[in-house]
Image: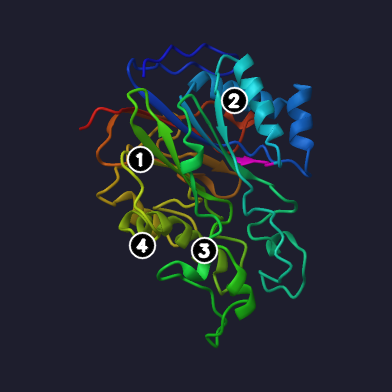
Amino acid sequence: MRRLAASLLPLFFALPVLADSLRIATFNTELSRDGPGLLLRDLERGKDPQINAVIAQIAAVNPDVLVLQGIDWDYENRALQALQDRLKQAGSDYPYIFARLPNSGMASDLDLDGDGRLGGPRDSQGYGNFTGEGGNAVLSRLPIEYDAVRDLSPLLWRDLPGALLPQHPDGTPFPSKRALQAQRLSSTAHWIIPLVTSDGGTLTLLSFQATPPLFDGPEDRNGRRNADEIRLWQLLLDGDLGPVPKSPLVIAGGANLDPNRGDGRRSSIAELLADPRLQDPHPTSPEAGLNTVEWQRAGRMRVDYLLPSADLRVLDAGVAWSPTSDLASRHRLVWLDISLDPQ
């Protein structure tokens, strides 16, 4: 797919673009707002500094396929369509979009976090104060095979082979057997999205956003769930969760886990990075190396990933990091240039 050079926009430099390549990006935009409809309001007003910074960063990198996290979902995808319009005005046109109801903010009517109360954000299938808070989305210049999309988000945690289910010290289910009978694995979503390439082939996008392995107790509920959300991809490639996705493919999204530092079961992301069916292109920036986020307390870490299958030819990769990136999100946009010609 022949690419046009990205335009230089205020606050961000334009990344060089390779001819006859396909650029894929993942970006945790942290565009979530305090209530339903507020993101759409802010997008339409056009004056929100954070939204403007997010749009500028995306337009500067100008990917062909853009995987977003941290964007509120609504039933008609009106907020996503408003973002689509704003990006088109900035020179990045995405005729195809995809988003579905995420698990984040999906009420369960159960005490899922074991605090003895109902109706809290941690009692949703994934953390959230309202339906659709902090969901995922895909914008693409490649046609999306909508009828062939597989959504693994409804998968119950207990049904994942070898699930690391949390327990009380006496070995009973945490917080309760009833809760684990209803608890979904995905804290946000796991999607398998086929994209049609210019030669009529298929590129399969595996999109997700895992829960932070923090904010729990000695049962390590979030740490265990984070590890299993990451491990799901290897089980999928093993054929343990239905048909194996068609290759070539790219895993794109947020693991919320660094293989070398921070809390969490780091072996889960280390094993995914080392899987011979995938390759780690090691996207870097001069400013922060492999790091993709900067948190106030934890500092810089690598938690956002693009992992192409081993049969793809990687041309370039990087992390869009600049002094003004903080205006957009604590996370940085990660990008990858690939050729669809076999290795």
- In the picture of the structure, the residue carrying the numbered disc 4 is 240
Label 2, label 4: how far apart the Cα atoms are:
43 Å
Disc ID at residue 225:
3
Whether label 1 touches label 4, CB < 8 Å? no
Residue at far bottom of view: 170
- Closer to the chain start, of discs 1 and 3, is 3
Q: Residue at x 60, y 14 (%)?
A: 10
Label 3, label 2: how far apart the Cα atoms are:
33 Å
Mark 4 residue crowding within 10 angstroms, few (<14) / some (14–19) / many (20+): some
Disc ID at residue 249:
1
Way the structure is coloured: rainbow
* Position of 88 relative to 42 (above/below): above
Q: Name the element at disc 2.
A: loop
Query: Label 2 is placed on what type of residue?
Result: Thr
Mark 3 residue crowding within 10 angstroms, few (<14) / some (14–19) / many (20+): many
Label 2, label 1: how far apart the Cα atoms are:
32 Å
Residue 176 visible = no
Mark 2 residue crowding within 10 angstroms, few (<14) / some (14–19) / many (20+): few
Q: Foreground: 99 or 186?
A: 99
Q: Residue 62: where, in percent of width, then height?
A: 49, 21
- Closer to the chain start, of discs 2 and 4, is 4
Q: Is residue 173 left or right of residue 284?
A: right
Q: Residue at x 54, y 23 (%)?
A: 94
